[in-house]
Amino acid sequence: MSKGVGLDIGTMNLVSAKMVENKTTTSRMRDAFLPLDADAKKMLKLSGVDFIDRGEEGVVVVGDAALEMANVFGTEVSRPLSQGLISAGELDALSVLGTLIKSVLGEPREENEVCFFSVPAAPIDEKRDVIYHKGVFERIVEECGYEAFASNEAMAIVYAETAKDGFSGLGISFGSGMCNLALSISGMEAMTFSVARGGDWIDEGAAKAVGSTKSRMCAIKEKGIDLMEPKSREEEALALYYKSLIEYCIEQTISEFNKIKDKFSMPKPVPIVISGGTSMAGSFVPFFTRVFKKKMRKFPFEVSEIRHASDPLNAVAKGLLIQAMQEYED
């Protein structure tokens, strides 16, 4: 039995990865909740929906069911994380997160089994408390019976996806709350940063543009949208915000690399590996490539190819699992 667990803590999804019978298995849960009155309890029991019973204070629907019910009632779900990070005042979110993480991790297979969990790099465009975020999740993971290690989210993509490239490449995790970027040279972290924009930023901007809700725009994305061929006013608004997000990430990469370019050399072209739930929109990689080509003359290092991670929703968790398993190597 190979020990060790990877845990990707995202604004939209929680994903764990383990090695079971020489195969990597993943478990996913929507990182969302919806508080309801206590009288909804009977209905929820009949429907088999996951919820937390809080007695007279009501119930909290968690996971995918929370988003489904929010769409039914025309309301917005609550998220334990906001824009990639948890805030100090979210007391309800902390209790919900503990339940969600315990569910997606399961019981440790030995006492203090190693768990590597994802942490975003500090955003360069907003001041946010990454230290508090890291500490909260370290405590939650340890309370689930694991030994917790924090690890950079975008570097995990490099570990999972660039073995054939000598663990060199630019990993980009397009998440719901943030986009994380990491440049690795032969497995060594050369540059990491995040931007405070992601899928939620797209949904919010597109919703305002067409007079809709974030939940509806998210549902349109997940139902299926081809960024190269938007078919409605809503899809066109989403595509425009996707384009803006990609441009922003490329511009920030140019700016951040130029700050450190004199500290090391780039011996050869490296791939850009794209991952994350926000990158699951149809034709995302061709769309990204088209946007990138317009910025290519200003890009500060050579790119060998632009490709999607082999498993975009689970790449971060799998990269974290690789790191966790190495803790057991002699």
Image (tube, grey):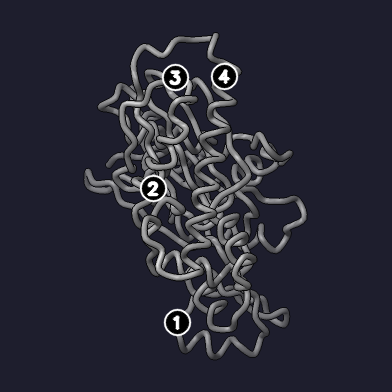
CA distance separating discs 2 and 1: 40 Å
Residue position for label 1: 48
What's the CA distance linking mark 4 and mark 2?
25 Å
> How far separated are the C-alphas under marks 3 and 2?
29 Å
- Mark 3 vs mark 2: in front: 2
Q: Which residue is mark 2?
A: 287
Location of mark 4 (residue):
258
3D distance between C-alphas at marks 1 and 3: 47 Å
For label 1, the SS is loop
First-in-chain label (1 vs 3): 1
Q: Nearer the viewer, mark 1 or mark 3?
A: 3
User: Around disc 3, counting alpha carbons within 10 Å, would you say few (fewer than 14), some (14 to 19), or many (20 or more)?
Assistant: few
- Mark 4–mark 2 CB contact (< 8 Å): no
Of the residues under marks 4 and 2, which one precedes in the sequence?
4
Closer to us: 81 or 286 = 286
Q: Residue at x 63, y 78 (%)?
A: 59
Q: Amino acid at mark 2?
A: Phe
Q: Residue at x 57, y 16 (%)?
A: 260
Looking at the rendered structure, the kind of residue marked 4 is Asn
Instruction: Say which residue label 3 marks.
Output: 188
Please provide percent x and percent y for residue 32: 56, 65
Whichever of labels 1 and 4 marks the residue nearer the N terminus, that label is 1
Circle 3 sits in a helix, a strand or a loop, which is it? strand
